[in-house]
C-alpha cells in the first residue's frame, strides 16, 4: 500500500509552493491597508557582494501613496535588512489576520 501511495499520492491536493518568488507583507502608515508583494528571484533581485538587493515602489489599494521598499538578502534568500518608507513590514500571519477581519 505504501508503494502505491508513493507512486500515485494519497489523493490529497498538495499546497502550492512558489519556488521562484519571495513574498513580503506590508502596511501603509497612512491608510493602514495591508499588501502582499511578490519578488521574482530571477528578475527582481540585483546581485550585490554577499547576496541580493531588492528595491520596489509599493502602492496599496487604499490611499495609493507610494512606499519605497529596500530589502537586502543573503545568498540563501534570508532577509538581512529591510526598510520601508511610508509603511512597515508585517508577517504573513499578521497579513492574513488583517485580511480576515475585512
Image (spheres, rainbow, N blue to C red):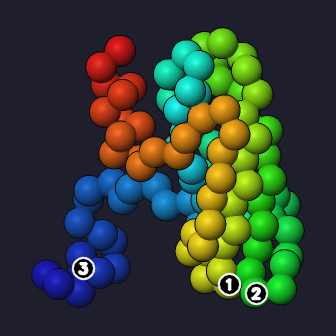
Q: Nearer the viewer, residue 1 or 33?
A: 33
Q: CA distance from mark 1 to mark 3?
A: 38 Å
Check the image and report above or below for 35 versus 64: below
Q: Position of residue 52 (x, y in %)?
A: 76, 73
CB of mark 1 within 8 Å of CB of mark 3? no
CB of mark 2 within 8 Å of CB of mark 1? yes
Q: Earlier in the sequence, mark 3 or mark 2?
A: 3
**Residue picked out by circle 2:** 50
Q: Earlier in the sequence, mark 1 or mark 3?
A: 3
Q: CA distance from mark 3 to mark 2?
A: 45 Å
Could you say whether the residue bearing mark 1 is in a helix, strand or loop?
A: loop
Q: Nearer the observer, disc 1 or disc 3?
A: 1
**Residue picked out by circle 1:** 75
Label disc, if present, on residue 4 of the rendered structure = 3
Quarter of the image where the N terminus is located: bottom left
Q: Is residue 55 visible?
A: yes
Amino acid at each position: 500500500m505504501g508503494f502505491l501511495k508513493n507512486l500515485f499520492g494519497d489523493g490529497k491536493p498538495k499546497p502550492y509552493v512558489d519556488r521562484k518568488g519571495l513574498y513580503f507583507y506590508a502596511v501603509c502608515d497612512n491608510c493602514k491597508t495591508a499588501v502582499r508583494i511578490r519578488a521574482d528571484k530571477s528578475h527582481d533581485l540585483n546581485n550585490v557582494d554577499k547576496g541580493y538587493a531588492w528595491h520596489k515602489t509599493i502602492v496599496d489599494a487604499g490611499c495609493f501613496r507610494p512606499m519605497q521598499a529596500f530589502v537586502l538578502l543573503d545568498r540563501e534568500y534570508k532577509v538581512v535588512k529591510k526598510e520601508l518608507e511610508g509603511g512597515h513590514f508585517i508577517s504573513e500571519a499578521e497579513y492574513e489576520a488583517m485580511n480576515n477581519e475585512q
